[in-house]
Amino acid sequence: MKRMRYNSAMKRLACLLISLSVALASPIPSEGRTQQEESELTARYLTILLNVGRLVVERNQPLINDPEQGDKGFTPDSFERDVVAEFRQQTGIDLKHLPPHLPALTKELLPLLLESGKQVVADAQLVINQRGIGYKNFIPATFGSQTSRKFSSRSRVTLKQTTLNPRNPKNAPDAYEERVLKRLATQPASNEPLAEWVDGGRTLRMMTPIYYSEDCLSCHGSPAGILDISGYPREGAREGDLAGAISVQIPVSPP
């Protein structure tokens, strides 16, 4: 009974996943592509790949939180296999054999983001394989935050999960993200990313919104202030409310 309760709770917790259409990843012919177009395409692919990693963690949540099983077999290698398969399913692109039509920046950064996700899974092995504990706080949001920070520290691109009311202070929005999130909160739900060039056209800011689903509300819904299974107070959110966004920031050298 205890195991069933943990698994059920984890399925409800593993939410806030983005439903990006394959159209976002449709390849643009390499000829005639501007530097700005290549940066925007790269930002979209990075968002999709981060979301795919979150999805793989979500699918393995009952296994990760099984208190009776020790070695779960959810390793960096198994994570990579699942991510490669899912990314290919969503975009038609094989991460192990990147096609030549992709921008050079995309081909540089996708492997780096995949490797960052693998290292986050590797770092969590002691926690994941611990017996006697159900909830381990290795959920999609945790994975996404840690992977984003690891990736950002190794590249000139900043990748981030953010929200107006972050549970983790490290995910707090900067001034630009806060302004966009407030605007998104007043608009109809849409999975379309918002892209804008700032700093005189030298920096791409792209934000892809995330919305609460019904399953999210057991932890993020009403009554506001009541602690959820992870020990955080619920936000009092409703289905369809803006949960946050995945933010990408890419500086571009002038031509």
Image (cartoon, grey):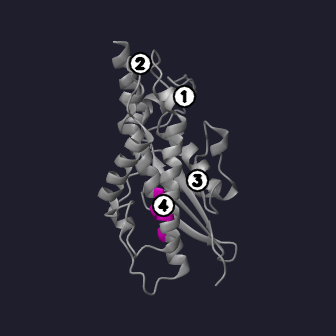
Residue 89 is labelled as none
- Residue type, mark 2 in image: Pro
Residue 157: x and y in percent read 61, 62
Between tags 1 and 3, which lies in front?
Answer: 3
Q: Quadrant of residue 152?
A: bottom right
Membership of 62 in magenta stretch: no
Name the residue located 55 percent from the left edge and 77 percent from the top edge.
Answer: 36
Note whether 59 is above or below 52 in the view shown: above
Disc 4 packing (10 Å; few <14; some 14–19; many ≥20): some
| Front-most of residues 232 and 224 | 232
Q: Is residue 1 visible?
A: yes
Membership of 44 in magenta stretch: yes
Disc 3 packing (10 Å; few <14; some 14–19; many ≥20): many
Q: Indicate the secondary structure of the residue bearing disc 1.
A: loop
Q: Which residue is mark 3?
A: 151
Q: Indicate the secondary structure of the residue bearing disc 2.
A: loop
Cα separation between marks 3 and 4: 10 Å
Task: Return the disc, 3 or 2, that comes first in the chain's sequence.
Answer: 2
Residue 137: x and y in percent read 52, 29
